[in-house]
Every structure is written in C-alpha cells, then in structure tokens.
Image: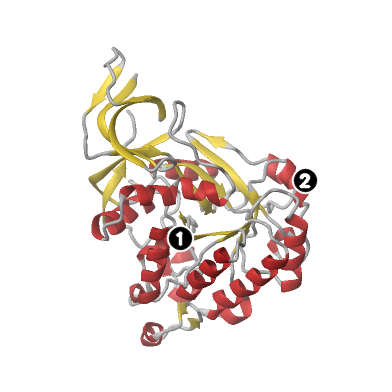
Amino acid sequence: MADLFRQIRVLDPATGSDRRRDVRIQGGRLIAIADSLDTQPEDQVHSHPDWVLGPALTDLYSRSGEPGAEPRETWQSLAAAAAAGGFGRVLLLPEGEPWLDQAEALTARPRQLGSVQLDYWAAYSQQGQGEQLSELAELATQGAIGFGDGQPLASPAFLRQLLLYSRSLNRPLLIWPCDRQLRGKGRARQGSLALRWGLPVDPQSSETAALALLLELLADSPTPVHLMRISTARSVELIAQAKQRGLPVTASVTWLHLLGNTADLSDYEPNLRLAPPLPEPDEQAVLQQAVRDGLIEAIAVDHSPYLYEEKTVAFGEAPAGAIGLELALPQLWQKLVVEAGWSPLTLWQRLSTGPQHCIGETPRSLSEGDRVTVFDPQQSWTVSETSLRSQARNTHLLGQTMIGRIWQSA
C-alpha cells in the first residue's frame, strides 16, 4: 500500500522550492513526485492542501539514557520519539557507560532503528574530562560523524591541541563555548529578571569570553567547528565577525532558547532549568533574527531525558535539560511561522539542510528513495503521558495543547 498526496505543499530546502505537487510515498520514503501523478490500484489517496511535506528532519545533538541510564531513555524509545517528531536522523552526544571515547564503544551502538538513522559525536577527550585527547583518528575511521564532548570548553591549552590535531581528520568539532568558572552556580542569565526572581546569575560573558578565546585559537589553526548552544546577542556578533574573517565556523541554537526567555522562569519550572540558561527577552529576539537570516544555520533539539524524580526538585537543584524531539517542530511552526511570519521553507531549512551543512555534508534536492516527513500544521493534540513516545516526561509542556502533528502512515 502506498500513500498518494494530491497537491500537497512540498518544501525542498536544498533548492529553495516551495510548491504544490503530487507525491507518492511508501514506508515513509518518496516513491514519485510530479506536478500530476496517475492513481495506482495500491494507492491510498489523500487530499490535504494545507499539509506540508519535506525531507525528514535532522537533529544535530541530543542525548539518550542508553547505554548506562536506560530508565531515562533507551535507543528504541528515543528513535520512536524522533520518528513521531518528524526526525529521520539524530546525532547523539557521547555520554554513556561506556563513554564514547573508544572505537569499540562506537561500533557497539546502533546506526538504524526503524525509520531513524543514528549518528554519533565521539568524545574528543577521554571521559569528556577535557584533559587527554581520545583516539580521534581511530574513531574517525570507525564512522564518528565528528568530535564533541557536549561539555563546557576545556582549558585553552587543551583546546589549542585539539584544534591542531583534528585538522587532518576531515571531521567537524562540536564545541560548547562556556567558561565553567565564570558560569559558577548560575541558573539564569544576568539581568533584571534574574534579580527579580532571586536566581543566581550565569553572566553572558561565560559564553562570550569562551567563544572569543576559541575564535582566536581557530584563526591560528583553522578546522571546521560547530558552535553549539549559542544563547547570547554578543555571541551572534562574534560569529558574524568570525565569518567575515573567513573562519570555518557554523552555529546552532536550541529550540527552547529560540522560544523561551528569562521571563518564563517566574514560576521556577524545573523543566526550564537549562544550560546555558534561557536568554533575556531582547537577546531572544536577536537569536531569532540570526536564525531567520541564516547567520546561525541550524536549530537543534538537544533532547535530554531525565527521570521524574530527578526533575521534581527545586529549580536550582534540577539537572539541566528537557526532552523535545516530539515537540520542537509543532512549537517552532506555531511560534515562528504562524505568529512571527517566518516562511515554512526557512524553518524547514534550519531543521534539515542546515544541520547537514553544519557537519560538512552537501544537501541535495528531494529524490526518489529519500525519507520524508508529512506535517499537519493544524491538528491539535495534548502532550500527555500516553501521547508521548519518549520514555521521559521532563517537559514544561506536559498537559498543554499542541497545534501541529506529524502524519503517520497506517
């Protein structure tokens, strides 16, 4: 049985095309696309001109509990959540037991679960401690997509060594610009709202000082670097300057940092305890504009599952992170496309071809055999224990009504 969509809105981010076409898909993959297709006996015909079809989404960095913390999330439940959210590919951070800093740990991890492809950032330092380099060449040979600890920046000396050593490996580095000492025990970005809520501050300089240092070292040792979890307006300025200098950098913002700000912390919701913290409202606007303009190429989910007991604590004691693979697209569509007037194509680019560009891949036009995502932007559903496919429930959206949902074939 195949599904034939009559005159569905087709987004092709690689070519910048946004037009209505007939599309036949089977098993979530594109079988045929044309201005008009003849109906076949095996077709289930759908006529939903307000629905959207595009390439399956790619998430640049997320976490799974497995291996080592399976009660939080398994690879299977993460893949189910990704598929339910329209993601056909997820790049996972190296945390786990064992830590992904050796080739044998990489070869033991799954690469395909159902419709979802899993790729891995191998740790650039042993156990993510930022002290000794991992066996980067061996990890690259075994198929690591790139190298990233998912932890704040290591010492300047280690960072310089990493940049020098990785130049010949043809793999991007995933780096979180964050100075641990400047960050301290901060839980909210410095500003009047953090003062009003009585929250210890994480100054913007914890990000920007680390970023400025990285960019200076990168000028001496150019190698592709992806800047993860960008969250301040000054960082946007530094990234723009770096690109003007010709430095090989790309950047991403998480979906929650695009849609939330410090004002959302007024009720001390533990599931909005994030690292880095949510931006100040004026900085949130700068981040949105940078993503819309393409200066920041990608939106990441940074899906971070935790147990109920881990998150049901005081705001300042909660571990940083929230789930989002099933929630990101409908929330981003509603807030940015419907309310802020972004083009659907721009949003789809930042969630599909943008991430591909950030890992050094050349996006291509939709072709037969490609995995696709079909999105109904008007369907309402409630975020609940039963509607979520993820094993974790740590989201501030639990119990709320969502508008927009991925279509799943029968």
Residue 30, position as x, y percentages in the image: 40, 28
Q: Is residue 162 visible?
A: yes
Position of 175 relative to 213 (above/below): above
Q: Residue at x 45, y 53 (%)?
A: 392
Residue 203, position as x, y percentages in the image: 51, 81
Q: Label 2 sits on what residue type?
A: Glu
Q: Residue at x 72, y 53 (%)?
A: 101
In the displayed structure image, the side of residue 349 where residue 267 appears, left or right: left
Q: Quadrant of residue 280?
A: bottom left
Comparing 126 with 88, the one in front is 88
Comparing 96 with 56, the one in front is 56
Position of 230 relative to 108 (above/below): below
Mark 2 = which residue? Answer: 138
Q: Is residue 262 visible?
A: no
Element at badge 1? strand
Q: Residue at x 37, y 72 (%)?
A: 261
Q: Label 1 sits on what residue type?
A: Thr
Mark 1 = which residue? Answer: 254
